[in-house]
Image (cartoon, rainbow, N blue to C red):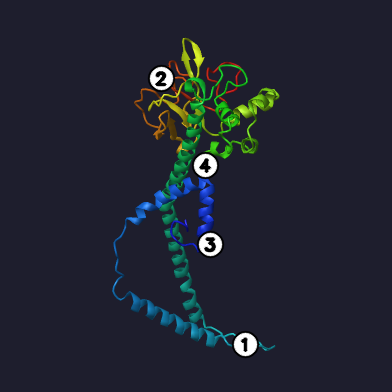
């Protein structure tokens, strides 16, 4: 923030610029903060202070100085064994002094009430601003991973996205991340965690922040540990579950379609009575489409979509029913929702 407001020393500016040159995440964060500050720069109006303000302030300072001087003079006492005698107040004087207490308490109550009201007014705006920054940050990370997926497809036969098997140890959506890592494209697993989405437990966080296993390592793992990696390999994102061609599961080809979803920063969480998303107030997610554009989509309203990002044309969170039906699932999701497979 100091860098954007030109409030740093030359040495601090140089340190920030050196870090910006080496840190892509910091560049995205700087861009997000600059966009938040941009509207403030448009307010160029000049406001004049009220007339007589300076005279009133100086007069108040003079009175405060005089009172401080009187209090200092009255408080000077000699230091010794003899303590000064305290004045004895009459009953009327005590009553007069006590009458000030209710006013002091009422002033304190009014001040606290004003503070509480102000906090109630400002808190939603602060939370909305913070969530907006996190949403923009997640979109930036989504863009980076989307570029990795396009690079991966460019060198694959038929330009397919990372393959998700229909059955077996590699039949989970989060295998995208492991295949990207194996291809040397993904070396920072923190990209897989949207700041709006908290890890579900400490085990998930500790394993998720470490290096991902290679395909061979995943295949040779004990089943219990492999299931943990199936759950966390894809981080907090949702990945394309593939498509069905002639009743066979297949991997989509990159064709730059503007309505075919490849990736999103929030997986669908289903329960018995509702469907929800884990980030952006539980009602929306950033969705990356095949042509590279990212759209923040709200799902708490009825959407008129030809191809919903999270359900196939039959209303199920499983592989698309044809080549143009894109469906996104969380890391541990089996594309065919087969019994006995980790979900």
> Badge 1 is on which residue?
84
User: Mark 3 sits on what residue?
Assistant: 11
Labelled pair 2, 4 in contact (Cβ < 8 Å) = no
The number of callouts visible is 4
Q: Which is in the foreground here, disc 2 or disc 3? A: 3
Question: What residue would you read off at disc 4?
Answer: 195
Disc 4 to disc 3, C-alpha distance: 30 Å
**Cα gap from disc 3 to disc 1, whole angstroms:** 58 Å
x, y percentage for residue 293?
A: 40, 33
* Vertical position of residue 315 compared to residue 20: above or below: above
Q: Nearer the viewer, residue 291 or 207?
A: 291
Q: Where residue 143 sits: x, y (%)?
A: 46, 36
Q: CA distance from mark 2 to mark 1?
A: 94 Å
Whole-percent x and y of residue 128? 42, 46
* Real-space Cα separation, disc 1 to disc 4, in angstroms: 64 Å
Check if mark 2's residue and mark 1's residue have beta carbons within 8 Å: no
């Amino acid at each position: 923030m100091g860098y954007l407001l030109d409030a740093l020393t030359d040495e601090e500016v140089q340190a920030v610029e050196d870090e910006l040159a080496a840190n892509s995440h910091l560049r995205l964060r700087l861009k997000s903060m600059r966009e938040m500050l941009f509207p403030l720069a448009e307010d160029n109006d000049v406001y004049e202070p009220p007339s007589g303000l300076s005279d009133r302030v100086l007069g108040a300072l003079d009175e405060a100085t005089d009172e401080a001087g009187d209090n200092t003079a009255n408080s000077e006492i000699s230091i010794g064994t003899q303590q000064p005698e305290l004045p004895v107040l009459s009953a009327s004087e005590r009553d007069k002094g006590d009458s000030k207490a209710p006013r002091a308490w009422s002033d304190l109550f009014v001040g606290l009430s004003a503070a509480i009201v102000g906090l109630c007014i400002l808190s939603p705006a602060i939370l909305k601003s913070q969530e907006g920054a996190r949403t923009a940050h997640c979109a930036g990370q989504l863009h980076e991973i989307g570029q990795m997926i396009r690079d991966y497809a460019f060198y694959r036969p038929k330009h397919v996205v990372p393959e998700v098997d229909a059955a077996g140890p590699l039949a989970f959506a989060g295998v995208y991340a492991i295949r990207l890592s194996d291809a040397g494209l993904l070396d920072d697993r923190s990209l897989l965690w949207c700041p709006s989405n908290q890890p579900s437990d400490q085990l998930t966080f500790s394993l998720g922040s470490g290096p991902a296993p290679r395909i061979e390592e995943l295949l040779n793992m004990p089943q219990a540990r492999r299931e943990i990696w199936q759950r966390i390999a894809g981080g907090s994102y949702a990945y394309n579950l593939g498509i069905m061609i002639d009743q066979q599961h297949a991997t989509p080809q990159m064709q730059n379609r503007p309505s075919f979803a490849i990736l999103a920063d929030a997986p669908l969480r289903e329960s018995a009575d509702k469907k929800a998303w884990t980030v952006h107030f539980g009602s929306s997610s950033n969705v990356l489409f095949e042509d590279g554009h990212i759209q923040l989509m709200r799902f708490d309203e009825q959407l008129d979509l030809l191809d919903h990002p999270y359900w196939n044309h039959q209303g199920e969170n499983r592989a698309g029913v044809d080549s143009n039906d894109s469906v996104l699932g969380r890391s541990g999701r089996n594309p065919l929702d087969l019994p006995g497979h980790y979900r």
